[in-house]
Amino acid sequence: MAMTTKAMRRDNDPIPAVAGIGLRLPHHAAFAAERPAIGFVEVHSENYLSGPAFADLVAIRADYPVSLHSVGLSLGSADGLDRRHLARLATLAHEIAPVLISEHLAWGAVDHAFLADLLPLPLTEESLAVVARNVAHAQDALGQRLLIENPATYLQFRHSTIPEPEFLAALVAETGCGLILDLNNIFVSAANHGFAAERFLEAMPGAAIGEYHLAGHNVLESEAATLLIDSHDRPIASGVWALFEMALTRFGPRPTLIEWDQALPPLAVLLAEAETAERLIGAHHHSDHQHDRAA
């Protein structure tokens, strides 16, 4: 990877509480042509580790803050992190100078084989030690704080002993990492496991939240049960928007990402969803300003 971007790199200071979109490869041409007014873009790191897509990302980074969202570190792997993959990610981060860099509370590799999925892990003291060790290793290699995303889940381990918000809070305390609060994932998991999304939200360590994620989900109906799937293939559901407004009220605005990964619509659809998020963020800012003036 040629060292071509140093002259145009920006400092990777935290970005303000604005809305952004997940930029996927099929939208590159439209994005380059339109240069939309958007607060930031987030890309999946593994798509840019080599090949022509990297040059596109360099061009985008010249004009937009970029967040790197990884799917391949496998932070829950007891084997530890794949050193080669981590080194390539660190090189990409050095070149792009992302404003945020993130991964998932999940695992997806064993014996150096990648399973191309984000798999759940039992929430125990033992797995907390594994994840904390891997997060610390990744942060040392990247020279930057990681944001860890709460997952959408479809099963729960009987021997889990730590509620997920407490697990994430302990991970933050041990490693200094931050969090992505994925509101769709909370909504999906709450429906699948029968807990109150609002109570889960209230238990999250708010000071550690560095970004919100919003996405669409699919509903699978059968005679036995209804299952929600974190599909990222449709507009954001009204219940997720409502949960986002609760998060804004409880924790305040954060950079907010619109994710759409399957059945991609025209770029304008993502931008319209980002505008909705921006309006909600703006309304919260206005409400806070009015409150401050009244006080």
Image (cartoon, grey):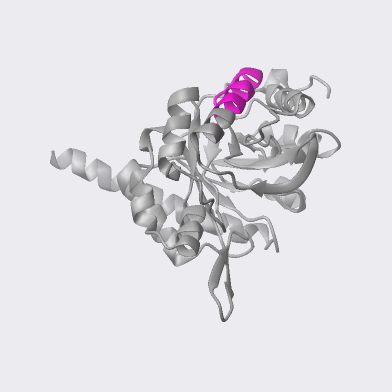
Q: Residue furthest right?
A: 51
Of residues 59 and 235, the one drawn nearer to the viewer in this rendering: 235
Tell me the quarter of the image containing the N terminus: top right
Measuring from the top left, give residue 51's x and y in whole percent. Answer: 86, 36
Measuring from the top left, give residue 205's x and y in whole percent. Answer: 38, 37
Identify the residue at horizontal 17%, vertical 39% (top origin).
Answer: 293
Q: Residue furthest bottom?
A: 223
Q: Is residue 142 above or below residue 111?
A: above
Of residues 102 and 98, the one drawn nearer to the viewer in this rendering: 102
Measuring from the top left, give residue 91's x and y in whole percent. Answer: 74, 23
Magenta span dominant secondary structure: helix
Identify the residue at horizontal 25%, vertical 41% (top origin).
Answer: 289
* Residue 53 seen by the camera: yes
* Residue 99 seen by the camera: no
Q: Residue furthest left?
A: 295
Measuring from the top left, give residue 10's x and y in whole percent. Answer: 61, 23
Q: Is residue 128 above or below residue 264?
A: above
* Residue 213 lies in the magenta-colored region: no
Q: How many marks?
A: 0
Identify the residue at horizontal 49%, vertical 45% (top origin).
Answer: 160
Q: Is residue 178 above or below residue 249?
A: above
| Residue range highlighted in magenta | 132-147
* Residue 139 lies in the magenta-colored region: yes
Of residues 233 and 155, the one drawn nearer to the viewer in this rendering: 155
Q: Residue furthest front?
A: 159
In the picture, measured across the screen, residue 129 lies left or right of residue 95, that is left
Tell me the quarter of the image containing the C terminus: top left
